[in-house]
Amino acid sequence: MTPRLEILMYHSISDTPGPTSISPQIFAAQMQALADSGLPVVSPDAMAAPPRARSVVITFDDGFADFDTVAWPILRTHGFCPIVYLPSGRMGGPEDWAGCNIPPRPLMSWDRVRHLAAEGVFFGGHSITHPDLTTLPADTLEHEVALSGQDIAARLGQPIRHFAPPYGASSPDVRRCIARHYTTSVGTRLGVARPGEDLHDLPRLEMFYFTDISRWQAHLAGRGGPYLAIRRTLRRARQMARTHFGVG
């Protein structure tokens, strides 16, 4: 089996509209298909080493309260252990950053985070206030990156080794800053991680693209390459349009 690590990206498991929400029913079907595939779902610490076989890591950004109430019970049923990236200065309140849902979705409390950590859920840094890190001066960038993990570590009594920049926004300076404090970092670059990847710019699979369960099953069966290629092409076209023409 080709060495590759497939890092799945989720945000909210809810019926709220938008690409950062996936319905509980679809999420349950995605996890059942993953379980049926027989692919190993591994610890996020596996991101730090080149994969020796095809395997999967499950990640969640932002720490929404529905991870605790909806996603975790489904994951626990299958024995899947995910990582949740937390904006440490926003926990216990609503999402309140640029591009957030209206009405805003609630984030987990620290009490629930501690409870989940005791059950085996991994946690990572996701900044303090969820800014676009590429827009920050060097001292503010250092503060947002370093203190996020330090705060989570102090609250949980365990090291925080992994990070995800908000919005997937990164740059060489941002990655160098992250690398000073974390073993790995994931972004929103669409793809699968292979040996030799930059450990601080790991690609992920945005699971909103796999809400069609038959398409997800085809990907798990090894027939997803053409679809991923199309999605990457469409993404690049949208990014070019935004860059050159200001099109959203």
Image (cartoon, rainbow, N blue to C red):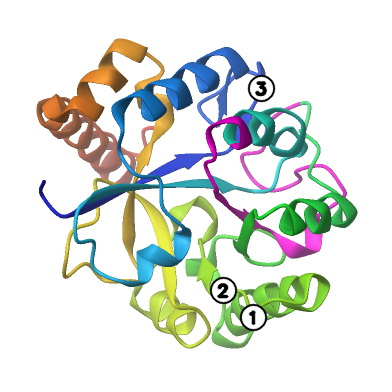
Inspect this view and state whether residue 126 appears. Answer: no
| Disc sitting over residue 140 in the figure | 1
Q: Amino acid at mark 1?
A: Thr
Of 193 and 142, nearer the camera is: 193
Against 214, residue 27 (above or below) is below
Quarter-of-image position of residue 231: top left
Q: Amino acid at mark 2?
A: Leu
Q: What separation in Å lies between label 3 and label 2 (alpha carbons)? A: 32 Å
* Residue 63 horizontal side relative to residue 247, left or right: right
Inspect this view and state whether residue 88 appears. Answer: yes
Secondary structure character of the magenta stretch overall: loop
Q: Amino acid at mark 3?
A: Ser
Q: Percent x, y for residue 21?
A: 58, 26
Which quadrant of the figure contains the C terminus?
Answer: top left
Pointer 2 with pointer 1, Cβ within 8 A = yes
Mark 3 / mark 1, whichever is N-terminal: 3
Q: Percent x, y for residue 62?
A: 65, 48
Of 181 and 240, nearer the camera is: 181
Q: Percent x, y for residue 99?
A: 61, 39
Q: Which residues are the magenta region?
A: 76-102
Of 43 and 145, nearer the camera is: 43
Q: Of helix, strand and loop, which one carries label 3?
A: loop
Q: Residue at x 38, y 29 (%)?
A: 34
Q: Of helix, strand and loop, which one carries label 2?
A: loop
* Residue 80 horizontal side relative to residue 111, left or right: left
Against 3, residue 218 (above or below) is above
Pointer 3 with pointer 1, Cβ within 8 A = no
Q: Residue at x 55, y 48 (%)?
A: 81
Magenta run includes residue 238: no
List the residue tagged with mark 3. Answer: 14
Q: Residue at x 45, y 66 (%)?
A: 45
